[in-house]
Image (cartoon, rainbow, N blue to C red):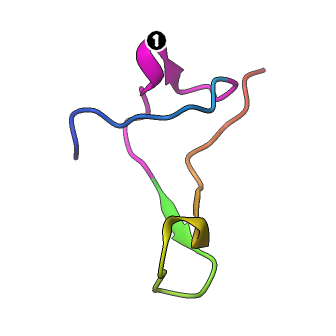
Amino acid sequence: MAKDVLCEVNNCTYWGTGNKCHAEAIYVVSHKGKQASNSEETDCKTFVPEA
């Protein structure tokens, strides 16, 4: 996995200083089945809002 996964969603449980993601794994899905043409067609399923 990439060493530096960046995220700007600062209300996520895994968000850290410097916009670094601290999740052990990242799960990204496409809106259009198994392929996407651009980043707007994807979602991060790893997101968990802060409690």
Farthest-out residue, top: 17
Whether residue 18 appears in magenta in the rendering, the answer is yes
Which three-letter amino acid code belongs to the residue tagged 1? Thr
Farthest-out residue, right: 51
Using the image, determine if residue 14 lies above or below residue 37. above
Q: Exactly how many numbered labels are in the figure?
A: 1
Q: Please indicate whether residue 3 sits to the left or right of residue 41 in the image.
A: left
* Range covered by the magenta-colored residues: 11-26
Q: Residue 35: x percent and y percent? A: 46, 85
Q: Residue at x 59, y 66 (%)?
A: 40
| Image quarter of the C terminus | top right
Using the image, determine if residue 38 lies above or below residue 5. below
Q: Please indicate whether residue 30 sits to the left or right of residue 25 in the image.
A: right
Q: Residue 1: x percent and y percent? A: 22, 47
* SS at circle 1: helix
Q: Quadrant of residue 21?
A: top left
Using the image, determine if residue 25 lies above or below residue 51. below
Q: Residue at x 46, y 11 (%)?
A: 17
Q: Residue 30: x percent and y percent? A: 55, 75
Q: Residue at x 38, y 45 (%)?
A: 25
Q: Please indicate whether residue 26 sits to the left or right of residue 47 in the image.
A: left
Q: Residue at x 56, y 31 (%)?
A: 8
Badge 1 is on which residue? 17
Whether residue 24 appears in magenta in the rendering, the answer is yes
Q: Residue 33: x percent and y percent? A: 56, 88
Tag 1: Cα neighbours inside 10 Å, few (<14), some, or many (≥20)? few
